[in-house]
Image (spheres, rainbow, N blue to C red):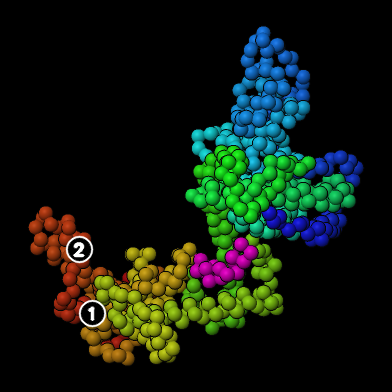
Amino acid sequence: MVLPPPLDTEQVDNRIKRFLDYCATRSQCCRNEQVEHTLVPVRFRPVPSNLCTRDGCFPGNADTKKYSVNRAPSYTHFFENPNLENLPVELYFELARYVHPIDLLNLARTSKSIRSILLAKRNQQIWKIALYSIPLLPPCPKDMSHPSYTALLFDEHCWACGSSQNYTEVDYFLRLRLCPECFDENVVSGATVEGIPDAVRDVVTMSIPRQMEDEPFHSPYDDTDVSPLLHKLEDFFFKPELHAMVEKLSSPTVPLECVGTYLLDQATYLHRRLVDAVELCRWETLILEFKGPDGHKLAREYTWSPYRDEHGYCQPLERCAEPASVEATELWLRYLLNAKNSNKILYERDRYSSRAIQTYGARLTRRRTQLADWAERMFASHPNFTKYDAGMFPTMTHVGDMLECFAAKDGARCFLHALLDVERPEDTEEGARLLDSLTRQVYKYYTRSQALGALQVLRDFGTNPRPGLFGREEVDRVKRSWKKYYPVLHHRPDALFICRKCPGRPPHPWKETHAHFRKEHPDFRGPPFVKSIRQWHGVALAREIVTEIGFGEEATITSLSQLVACGQLTCTCGALPVQASEDASLDWPTFVYHIHQHIDNERLAAQEEQAPPSEQQDSAHTPAPRDDIGEELRSLVKLLPEAPRRVSLARRCKQ
């Protein structure tokens, strides 16, 4: 079996040195030189004693203080009162050879007298006999008790609430077994702790275990590194451990030389603990491999030795030249497969695999947000983006998607503050790559968005009830000839667009519609072309108005808006102001939308008069057909030979 790489002590020493230098530069009031060295613990225990206070949920609960396991119990002779409480201890040792370790744990929960016998330190050999009878099971770590080790592996109770209704989730890195609700409550991201200096952050993350997130170490031949130096503040930690370690190291109250020794011992201990967790995962993998359809055939290719070394480690399986006999294989395979339910193992792995996906998604979202905020600053200040209109940039969420390769670096655990806080990102190599990627992505978005907008106008997208999407070749052709096609998008009178996410909003030109969409819907993922920003369905009316007033192809949105704003192009209904006011602006899109609404209202009113009373309610919600609107249009649209005399809004109000 291949073990993970050893701990890089040189990097550990470098982190400790940076932390000690940081503490030395702080004020002397932040530390007390008179505190004794004994206040620094030998190691930071993984599971606090207050994790569970219910009697019988966890072997190390508060009830053991009242009934000390070290107190010598007063035994009654077995033949005077024949029950398990009066059973001689020697028979417990013999009983452990034939029971599963979880049976001993359940037995210890039946009564306080049996509990005092099984949890006594002098009787820990009972647990060793039961655990060592399971083939290939790694020994109990030195910093864990055998009952705690048994509960971690085989128990079904939540260590926080004591619930056993459903399967619990186990994390061998954190050494926790919790129900899903308690797991969400007690395992939190390190990013929730704000304001941690970099020097403190590095030593905090290498001193506490993180949540187990992936499965690269399930193979016995994988040398995946589990060094605590790989921990980042974006990982998920056990909340009491995280807060206690942050508080301990933010303001150390012991001499700095003692803190350095403690941190080195803590990193070494944590690496050994993570290696033990890897071995447990690989032991479960063996159960799943031998539980398969060809598991028995595969097991006969190995030989197993029941002997263990002085530290409790069993000899690994060795391949044999010829398949072993069925009897020799069944001697150890049956006990291995019955040690733990394979369905329970699969459930636990599915749970932490799905949780790993969720935690990765949360980290990636935070990275995207950081990059989007940085991109906004670049859009406003960097010379690379001054040539673009401010409203034509992609949305914040879309910018984060564009830079996902940077956000997903190192499993979305990379620190971006040092990179994004630089005023001139091109001064650094990584910043130059990031800025170059953003520049290329924005140019691609800018040209593609305008190409798709121009194609909607050319193909009369708004009048087609079920328009088809554009092909890549067609879009590329328009992008290559942008000088020819982009004026179509920005100047033609029928180049009016709507935001489909805001149904009641009037049509506007392309730039105004895109700027509105970017401001009001910053969380939209992907480009908004066609699906969210589409050509208005009343563009045919705009073309008919242009024909009615006698304008040809030379008419543009700008020229028509000037006529509407000065009052020369108006509507005879009287509802449209003669000229622009201080409260509202008059332009070509507003004028066309007003005519469109007026004709619709008149048609609907005429239909209600002609329809029977039972059908009036349904017809009121049906848009009127537009097969003949020439006469109505001539009666509404009026083009004056010259603009009316301008009268200020205040003067009109006085009149």
Identity of the residue furthest to the top in this view: 80
Residue 277 in picture, x, y percent from top left: 67, 48
Name the kind of residue labelled 2 in the image: Thr
Magenta residues (range): 396-412
Q: Tell whether 638 sits left or right of 192.
A: left
- According to the picture, the residue beneath numbered tag 2 turns out to be 622
- Between 608 and 110, the one nearer to me in the picture: 110
Residue 615 in picture, x, y percent from top left: 13, 57
Q: Tell whether 626 sits left or right of 361.
A: left
Q: Is residue 43 visible?
A: yes
Residue 7 in picture, x, y percent from top left: 77, 57
Query: Label 1 near label 2: C-beta < 8 Å?
Result: no
Choose top left, top right, bottom left or bottom right for residue 109: top right
Name the kind of residue labelled 1 in the image: Val
CA gap, disc 2 and disc 1:
25 Å
Q: Tell whether 637 sits left or right of 78.
A: left
Q: Tell whether 202 sits left or right of 573.
A: right
Q: Is residue 496 above or below residue 281?
A: below
Q: Residues within 10 Å of mark 2 (few under 14, many from 20)?
A: few
Q: Of marks 2 and 1, which one's residue comes earlier in the chain?
A: 2
User: In this figure, what is the number of numbered marks?
Assistant: 2
Identity of the residue furthest to the right in this view: 34
Q: Residue at x 56, y 36 (%)?
A: 156
Residue 460 part of the magenta-drawn span: no
Residue 401 part of the magenta-drawn span: yes
- Between 569 and 515, the one nearer to me in the picture: 515
Residue 506 in picture, x, y percent from top left: 34, 70
Q: Residue at x 46, y 69 (%)?
A: 526
- According to the picture, the residue beneath numbered tag 1 turns out to be 637
What is the magenta segment's predominant secondary structure? helix
* Quadrant housing the N terminus: bottom right
- Between 631 and 27, the one nearer to me in the picture: 27
